[in-house]
Image (cartoon, coloured by chain):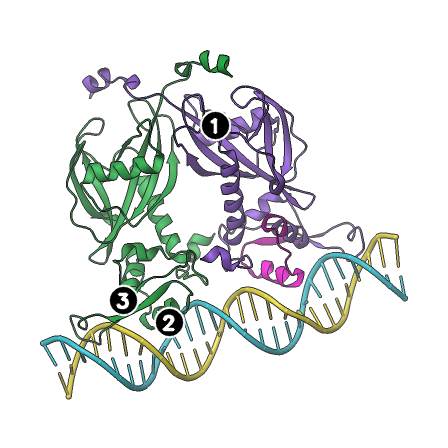
Chain colours: A purple, B green, C cyan, D yellow
DNA sequence: CCAATAGTGTCTTTAAGACATTATCCC
DNA sequence: GGGATAATGTCTTAAAGACACTATTGG
């Protein structure tokens, strides 16, 4: 083994670089938004892209994703949830060299506007359904991330990661409506959420006032201890997506 | 841009290698099996591992996975389904250098015994619930692959990827039972499969004989055109997995 | 009072699961 | 005939969806 390691030359292989890219999602003004940055360095300088960059020698992939997100966007609050999305590594996806990107998906409650940081000329939250052209294959990565988010709302309680510590059922419904892009029936949604064990638990409190246009005060809830929703909240199914 | 590329030195970054590893699953003798190889080269020479290896400069990640699977196991038939599973890249997961592995999940119908190929001293199908210790973090990758497979049987028609071109409903049920490790009610399963639009379509044929221990001839089906099962076939839910 | 929203009640339809029954085939 | 399996039928219960209704608030 020692002999083997001594005789081993990493340069024998074609050079490859590994990056992480982050699809960070939040909800603003009832629309799903993604965090994008204007690139401050080549390649694609001046173009919009997902935050990301090269991994460092002693950090895990998930750590690298969290670091790049914080560095490029100045957000000091960690997102409520972060998970690996997928990897993209076709030859030619980066003009510099062979680059394999591991993408991560992050969910955050509504946060302040980001500031541009390292390697970024600007950083903004932008509605996902109206995103400018993105560098590299980031358009595809974003699409995969959005679809993953839509799907995960069905069978996990991750919608609560978009909400604050406490929330009303209506706020939770607005999250589902924003991510799925579909209006939901308020009454049925209300009953269904409360019927799933461990999804939410009541705090005993209510909002201090009714809604801006009237209505009673709503009960406040926080995330429960369920890791999976059973039964699940399925999206209204679209025939096109099945075949 | 030209200036930038000319001044760019890939070696500035710490060297990283990228490998692909494949979790290839099939069903033999009513049990879920995974394809493993005995490593013929260091590191971990002599240990069992998932088939895999370094990506080549001009191939896509999925191509690399298919190539490694074919090379190391001598299986000339492509698996019925292959998809990306996840990526693993913590520092120290390979003694040689920083190695990031992109894992793929493959489903195959019952195939002949594999032959050891490049870099492999042996290659065998082995039951997943009784696998020997695997090199690197391959135990974890295998566990993730098996869980993905179990989950995908619920909402996609991928169980048919484990079957031949045509199959009976009972054969399909045995696939579900083998992957999930749970007995299913034959009558209810039968009715449910036929009630899901596009899951299977009849061929008009039946088996040539009844079962080995008697019984009528069964109708033959082939995979339908559905990409998602609606409604889904859910596993009998286990309370432990929810919280 | 009026509009808007929170929360609950009722009914219909669909699907899951337990179980029984009939028909067909091998021995 | 006897045992096994394919396929279908029946019944109960759970859940989804449509819709109505009451109660509470702000304006």
Percent from the top left, x then y, of residue B130? 23, 48
Within 10 angstroms of label 3, few (less than 14), some, or many (20 or more) residues? many
At mark 3, the secondary structure is loop
- Residue identifier under label 3: B168
Residue A125 is at least partly visible in this image: yes
Percent from the top left, x then y, of residue B113? 15, 47
Tell which tag, 2 or 1, sits nearer the viewer.
2
Residue name at image x 27 percent, y 45 percent: B24
Tell which tag, 2 or 3, sits nearer the viewer.
3
Percent from the top left, x then y, of residue A44? 54, 24
Residue name at image x 22 percent, y 39 percent: B70
In the image, A7 versus A93, the foreground residue is A93
At mark 2, the secondary structure is helix
Query: Is residue A65 found inside the magenta-colored segment of the image?
Result: no
Q: Quick one: which residue is furthest to the front in this view?
A: B2
Establish if B102 lies above or below A230: above
Residue name at image x 51 percent, y 21 percent: A43
Pinpoint the chain carrying mark 2: B
- Residue identifier under label 2: B191
Residue B50 is at least partly visible in this image: no
Snapshot quadrant of residue B58: top left
- Determine the CA span between mark 1 and mark 3: 49 Å
Establish if B32 lies above or below B200: above
Magenta stretch, residue numbers? A177-203
Query: Is residue A202 found inside the magenta-colored segment of the image?
Result: yes
- Residue identifier under label 1: A64
Q: Is residue B241 left or right of residue D5?
A: right
């Amino acid at each position: 083994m020692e002999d083997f390691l001594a005789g081993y030359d990493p340069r024998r292989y074609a050079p490859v670089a590994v990056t992480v890219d982050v699809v960070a999602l939040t909800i603003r003004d009832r629309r799903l938004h993604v965090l994008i940055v204007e690139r401050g360095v080549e390649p694609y300088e001046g173009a919009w892209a997902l935050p990301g960059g090269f991994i460092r020698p002693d950090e895990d992939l998930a750590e690298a994703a969290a670091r790049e997100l914080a560095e490029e966007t100045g957000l000091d609050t960690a997102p409520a949830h972060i998970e690996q999305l997928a990897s993209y590594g076709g030859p030619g996806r980066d003009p510099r060299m062979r680059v394999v990107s591991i993408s991560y998906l992050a969910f955050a409650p509504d946060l302040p506007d980001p500031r541009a940081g390292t390697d970024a000329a600007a950083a903004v939250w932008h509605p996902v359904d109206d995103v400018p052209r993105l560098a590299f294959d980031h358009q595809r990565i974003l699409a995969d991330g959005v679809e993953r988010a839509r799907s995960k709302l069905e069978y996990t309680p991750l919608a609560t990661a978009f909400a604050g510590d406490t929330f009303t059922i209506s706020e939770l419904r607005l999250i589902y409506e924003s991510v799925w892009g579909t209006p939901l029936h308020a009454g049925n949604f209300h009953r269904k959420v409360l019927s799933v064990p461990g999804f939410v638990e009541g705090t005993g409190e209510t909002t201090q006032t009714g809604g801006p246009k009237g209505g009673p005060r709503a009960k406040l809830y926080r995330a429960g201890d369920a890791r999976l929703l059973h039964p699940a909240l399925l999206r209204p199914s679209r025939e096109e997506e099945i075949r």
